[in-house]
Image: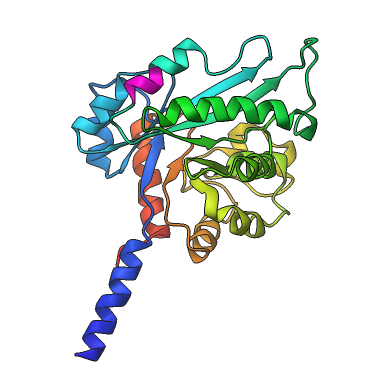
Amino acid sequence: MIRLALLLALASSAFAAANPFFAMDNIARGGPDTVPAMLRELGYDGYGGRVPDEIMAPAITAKGLKFFNGYHVIDLNPAQPAPNAALRTWLAAMSKYDTVLWLGINKVSRADGTLYAVSSTDADEFVLTQIRAIADAAAANHVRVALYPHTGFWMARVDDAQRLADKINRPDVGMTFNLCHWLKVEGAERDPVPVLRTALPRLMFVSISGADTGDTRTFGWDRLIQPLDSGTYDLAGFIKKLRALGYTGPVGFQGYNIKAEPREVLARSIAAWRKFNPTP
């Protein structure tokens, strides 16, 4: 009986550690009449969309899948405080979907119109007031916020998102680790594990793609964003380390600019995902 109880406990723990897996809209391409059924058939847990689209969320949830987030890029300017009317409208439409605003911060301007440098902490005070205002509007509609670091944006680094989330210190404001942007900004030689470990309490999402290894800061997206069964980067090892850290949150497949037919790419990628994450 003791041995059986132990085996059941181990199985339960392994099951609990399984990460929900979703496809981003840049590879799950198509409308509400095709994408939800395709993702359900292939075995995805859901979909990541974008602002201002209000159509996909109900279509995705009608198929028993989850609308994990809506991606939104903003420029911040003191003359135009955030959130604007369009974002407020989208947040109101998302109030019943238990979803997240996936927020990228591109350009940040001073009052005189000049731009803050990428990752400049001099902009933090202004940026934090804007994120708080967005988060308040989101919270009023039962939507959380996950900061999304992106190559070339003011918020380009995972460390930037971590710094801002820590300063805000709200349970409804977290951050994202995007593997392709990590490789482009930090390079394959920097170990992501210490950063992930520090980020873990605020880590809401991880996005992955197949990639090549080498001097990744010089690579184009064609080498940093591939189907999950492609590339020379040790993606299986990355997933293993991520799970060993105790991350049980959603993982998204980033498929930006992959030219192959979406269904084929999605099928190949979820097959690779299952090899990385064998079910107990």
**Which quadrant of the view contains residue 274?**
bottom left
The picture places residue 204, in percent across and down from the top left corner, at 48, 45
In the shown orientation, is residue 2 left or right of residue 174?
Answer: left
Residue 199 in view, yes or no? yes
**To which quarter of the image does residue 106 belong?**
top right
Is residue 2 depicted above or below 58 in this figure?
Answer: below
User: Would you say 217 lies left or right of 68 here?
Assistant: right
Residue 190 against residue 135 in the figure, above or below: below
Q: Quadrant of the N terminus?
A: bottom left
Of residue 280 and residue 89, the one placed in the foreground of this image is 89
Range shown magenta: 90-94
How many marks the image carries: the answer is 0
Q: Taking 131 as reference, is 173 above or below it?
A: below
Question: Extreme bottom residue here?
Answer: 2
Residue at image coords 68%, 34%: 156
At a point 68% along the width and 43% down the height, the residue shown is: 163
Residue under the point 51% across and 24% down: 72
* Residue 38 falls inside the magenta stretch: no
**3 to the left or right of 78:** left
Side of 276 where 10 appears, left or right: left
The overriding secondary structure of the stretch rendered in magenta is helix
Percent x, y for residue 55? 30, 19
Q: Position of residue 128 (x, y in %)?
A: 65, 31
The percent coordinates of residue 209 (x first, y second) are 51, 43
Q: Quadrant of the C terminus?
A: bottom left
